[in-house]
Image (cartoon, coloured by chain):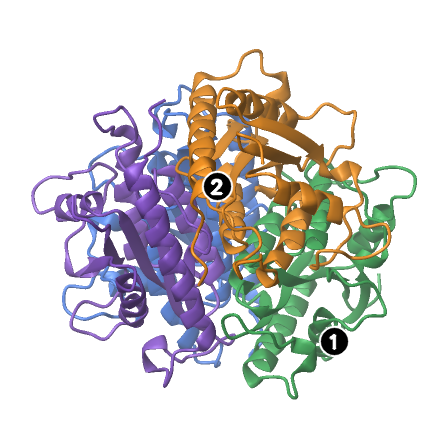
Chain colours: A purple, B green, C blue, D orange
């Protein structure tokens, strides 16, 4: 354990690397803001990996989930970033959540759900409408599988109804986005420190 | 029965009359567009009435729902309009849906759910984000309680993320909104005519 | 065009064939019920195919979506079946919806959205809780991309809270499920006939 | 400030007192479990009050929200309990959330959102299906307006699909519900203590 908590971010864009990703731009903002609180962030793009369909922690040969899972458990903060399609998180994001489902049946050495004492936050970008619904789905799933959601645990940007502008192409980051990201990062880092030094009780 | 189907619209704003309402502006567009298909629209603002909490068709003295219910059943098209708060339909809108729940237990003279052969469409406005989630909740509820949802059954406008502009204050109606409203109205009127002349079978 | 409308069903289970699937059991009931209305149903299991991530109608080499898309457009009724994971449709189902998103930009010879005049219904199964949320998401997406949702357009089964029984293992089909399936099939077949003989207007 | 955090619970049933309420039964379990962690719970039934439609902290004469708001701010833990109607939280619950929306514009003496350092959990009961969707909506709203959601922040019970049994009428509390309530209470009490002694930073 280092002196500071660390963060692991999963970019759930549909576009394989090296295509530019609006999620990446939002994750960059969050990583910078977490850095101000001495939290380093490692990022992975889920669609570059083969995350097999299923709901166990290892779906066998060729499944890249086990290494993603390790990185999630090695960090104190999980940042889940997704684009919006038809008002909802991407299929890649739902795949990640399905694999996290396995935590419901796994315990740590104290008999608690294996993910306990970790903080999760959500980053959402889209041309238009859907961010609140995305946060809702993700917060529910993440709390269910053992993560803690800080106050202001969501950062997002979407354009006007039926818009077609991408977050990656904005000339400047809207001030409200910057403020939200700043609060999210400060709260996530604070909460991760609290829970690392004084974790949830065993039941 | 007149020659043409008629529409009944419920404005689920939180603001009592005569306060201006963004939902009203959207409903005006829809009423005009339906008018081009010879469909007349009557509108009510739900918060001006006392719609009692409950899930029956008549919650007793002082309950204004029975008259709203009659107007719904007298029309071939229901237009449900709601603002967005915290990414969701208003409490007034959820109240209306709760009262529609009673249709699940009521049958017409042919033994079908009492609302069958009626079409429902959704109109959503908000400063920002939430329209797809609103459509989702409303379509699910409306299909469950017996309405038919046409292709393109939702018209909406929201501003950019964390915006504060109201639809009622826009200088001009965005072209995409006009197009959506036009399709919604044409499809709703067409479907209402089809179902009026040849309704669902008794089971 | 035959005398009768046809149905195409997509099973969005996470389990590749030949694993047993609760969705398959529900789809079997629906296919039988549609058969009573002279509608034949062809079924595909999406996870057996390679449906590439993306939001166009053809994501290039190795993408199996184009053939699925053809079958959807060849049928008058789409039956979308999904299991519930963490209270939501499967990642496989969200992938299918993402690919349907392309319909928003495609028109038929009359200038209408290419999917118009087709009916869509939803089938949901899970150990527990989530069916209404699934219907909501699917109805919204399906109406947005041009399908029409009939009255009672959803059939589902879930067990008691935190249950672990699968629909495929139930000794008998609950009567309420049978009734729902019967109504869904009758309404879908009726609506598909209406729209096939008298489709939505061009705008 | 006493030695121990306190909890305030809002029952969002549609039924005015003294009607029996399934939410009350669930809230009783949670209050007992919180009591084991030296947390006392006060409960109010929202439908017994006049909570005016609106999104400010005081909608004027006859509005009972200001006193509810004070109790929320006086406690370290908010327990929000709602029945499920048509797969969603009650209109009474959405009304409560709409009033909490005002927190977005209110700050404490340190310039933080006024609700910071408080924990929120969710209790959901219904005859059938909808609990995950309820948790999702409530977690999103509660995180947005400044509350922190602990790991396992939701307790719920629903019956089998299309069931009609009420939680208040169950002969015994299912063991899974008891376990969930126990974890929820332990985590909420722990997190409330952490945040009370070491709150979020000012931004």
According to the image, label 1 marks what residue? Answer: B28
The percent position of residue D167, horizontal first and vertical second, equals 59, 22
The chain letter under disc 1 is B
Q: How far apart are labels 2 and 1 at the CA level? A: 50 Å
**Residue C32 against residue A49 in the figure, above or below:** above
Question: Which is nearer the eye, A50 or D16?
Answer: D16
**Residue A56 against residue C53 in the figure, above or below:** above
According to the image, label 2 marks what residue? Answer: D196
The percent position of residue A111, horizontal first and vertical second, equals 27, 24
Question: Which is nearer the eye, D201 or D95?
Answer: D201
Per the rendering, the mark at residue B83 is none
Q: Are marks 2 and 1 in contact (CB under 8 Å)?
A: no
Q: Secondary structure at mark 1?
A: helix
Q: Residues within 10 Å of mark 1 (few under 14, many from 20)?
A: some
Residue, x 73% and y 58% (percent of image)? D54
Q: Give residue A175's quadrant in the image.
A: bottom left
Split into 4 quadrants, where in the image is the N terminus of chain C?
A: bottom left
Residue, x 80% and y 62% (percent of image)? B45
Outermost residue toward the top in this view: D171
The percent position of residue D119, horizontal first and vertical second, equals 50, 41
Residue, x 28% and y 60% (percent of image)? A12
Count up the numbered dots: 2
**Residue B188 against residue C44 in the figure, above or below:** below
Question: Is any atom of residue A111 visible in this view?
Answer: yes
The percent position of residue A190, horizontal first and vertical second, equals 36, 51
């Amino acid at each position: 354990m280092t002196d500071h908590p660390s963060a692991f971010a999963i970019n759930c864009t549909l576009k394989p690397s090296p295509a530019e990703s609006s999620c990446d731009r939002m994750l960059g903002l969050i990583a910078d803001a977490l850095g101000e609180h001495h939290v380093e962030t490692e990022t992975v793009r889920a669609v570059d990996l083969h995350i097999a369909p299923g709901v166990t922690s290892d779906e066998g040969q060729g499944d890249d989930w086990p290494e993603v899972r390790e990185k999630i458990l090695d960090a104190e903060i999980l940042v889940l970033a997704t684009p919006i399609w038809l008002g909802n998180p991407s299929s890649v994001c739902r795949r990640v959540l399905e694999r996290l489902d396995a935590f419901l049946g796994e315990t740590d050495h104290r008999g608690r759900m294996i993910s306990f004492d970790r903080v999760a936050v959500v980053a959402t970008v889209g041309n238009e409408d859907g961010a609140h619904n995305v946060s809702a789905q993700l917060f529910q799933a993440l709390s269910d599988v053992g993560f803690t959601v800080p106050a202001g645990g969501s950062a997002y940007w979407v354009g006007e109804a039926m818009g077609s502008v991408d977050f990656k192409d904005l000339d400047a980051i809207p001030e409200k986005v910057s403020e939200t990201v700043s609060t999210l990062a400060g709260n996530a880092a604070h909460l991760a420190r609290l829970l690392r030094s004084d974790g949830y009780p065993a039941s």
